Image: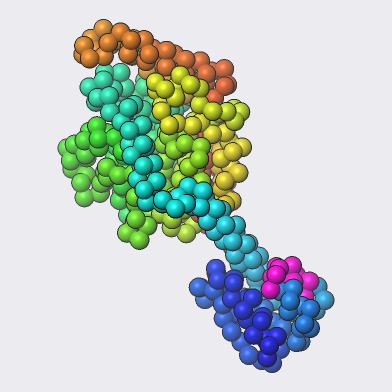
Amino acid sequence: MLKKAALKAALSHWNKGGFSVRFWDGEEKSYGTEPPKFTIIFSREPNLKDVKNISSDLILTLGEAYMDGSIDFEGSIDDVIAVMFQNQEHDIKKHAIDDLRKKLFAGIEEQKKEKIEEQEKKNIHSHYDIGNDFYSEWLDETMSYSCAYFKHTTDTLKDAQLNKIDHSLQKLLLKKDETLLDIGCGWGWLVIRAAQKYGVKATGITLSEEQYIGATERIKKLGLSDRVEILLLNYMDLDPKKYQFDKIVSIGMFEHVGKEFLPLYLHKVNTLLKKQGLFLLHSIMGFTEAPTNSWMKKYIFPGGYVPTVHETVGYFPDFNFYLLHLESLRRHYALTLDEWYKRFMACRDILPEKYDEKFKRMWRLYLSGCAAAFRTGNIDVVQFLLSKGVNNTLPMTNKYMYEE
């Protein structure tokens, strides 16, 4: 009886998925949070050594027990392996999050969290709340302030921005009435387009008051208030008990999170995304891991950090994200910045007086310098398509990633 009690205690740690165990005396017990998909069958009572080992390394012990004929499995081996890794990943992720919380919020969790969120709001305000009148002078009609997608080098900026939005939404395989979250929604055209084209129920969040006002007005004008909502909110404050999404997209937001908080960001996305849901992460990426250059940090994106592909991909397993597709849009961003630069230079003399010559020169350097950085390959911009957990229901080929 002591051996069985010890086995039950060890097996109870596999609390993800669902399976049953048939013991040597005929008793059968179910484990996990889902209906059992397979059965572990003990053909004989294990010895004391096996019981001790199973408590310290369940996967190794079950594997060895199967090898020596002490146990067998009834059901699909795919299901056995899935549950095995599901619980192993859960342990890794929990450990990573626990360590992160200790590091970030030890002793003064709420106070420090409020301080972080306040700083993030200031950082966003310093760049995005310059004024809608400023950005509307040189952005295209969609007010998209991120990398466009040029099917042809002759595309207009507006067409290229709509291409980017459609290209991004197409990867998410949206279906009518699915829920979509856009983290860092800008002036809202992506969520608007998603509602119009796919019939989804979309939520956008931003910390920029100017973007919130502009996006909300646009949605109301288009008669989409029943399908699209914009929240003036920090992404960390979205309550996963209230909000769960089929799909999540984040374009040009990840760069603002800061190196220290990249894992926290991915953890938050994990809590808001439904099982097997898709997440499209679009972010500027550095070629090598390095701090943000001091000029950009001081004048353009305070608090920002450009991660590398290597660094970012390394976090995915900790948060149960599976990489389905990766695409570089580096040359597209160089063209985008060239267009922004030309449009900015064309309107600089008619900007309101509050935008003085020093400010104009700063933006001239920023736009032209970033275009050069993308062109020379010092920085990149990448779209990662991820699933939360294994998703075997998607198309077998990559045709759905690209425009036909």
Residue at 62% x, 62% y: name it: 88
Left or right, residue 246 beside residue 79: left
Q: Which residues make up the magenta segment?
A: 55-66
Looking at the picture, does residue 151 appear above or below residue 247? above
Residue 400 % position (x, y): 50, 43
Using the rendered image of the protein, determine whether residue 241 is visible from the camera's viewpoint. Answer: yes
Instruction: Please state the horizontal and vertical placement of residue 264, each as a whole percent of the image.
Output: 47, 47
Left or right of residue 29: residue 112? left
| 300 lies above or below 364 | below
Judged left or right of residue 6, residue 368 is left
- Residue under the point 41% across and 51% down: 109
Q: Using residue 82 as the reference point, say whether residue 64 is left or right of it.
A: right
Residue 395 visible in the current orientation: no
Q: Nearer the viewer, residue 375 or 133?
A: 133
Q: Percent x, y for residue 324?
A: 56, 46
Residue 389, quarter of picture: bottom right
Residue 8 image offset from top left, x and y in percent:
63, 81
Judge whether residue 197 is colored magenta: no
Residue 42 or residue 49, whichever sits in front: 49
* Residue at screen point 27% across, 42% down: 232
Up-down relation of residue 104 to residue 163 (above or below): below
From the viewer's perspective, is residue 243 above or below residue 134? below
Q: Residue furthest right?
A: 68
Q: Residue at x 54, y 74 (%)?
A: 32
Q: Quarter of the image holding residue 221?
A: top left
Query: Which colour scheme appears in the figure?
Result: rainbow
- Quadrant holding the N terminus: bottom right
Using the image as rendered, state which of residue 401 and residue 346 is in the foreground: 346
**Main SS of residues in magenta:** helix
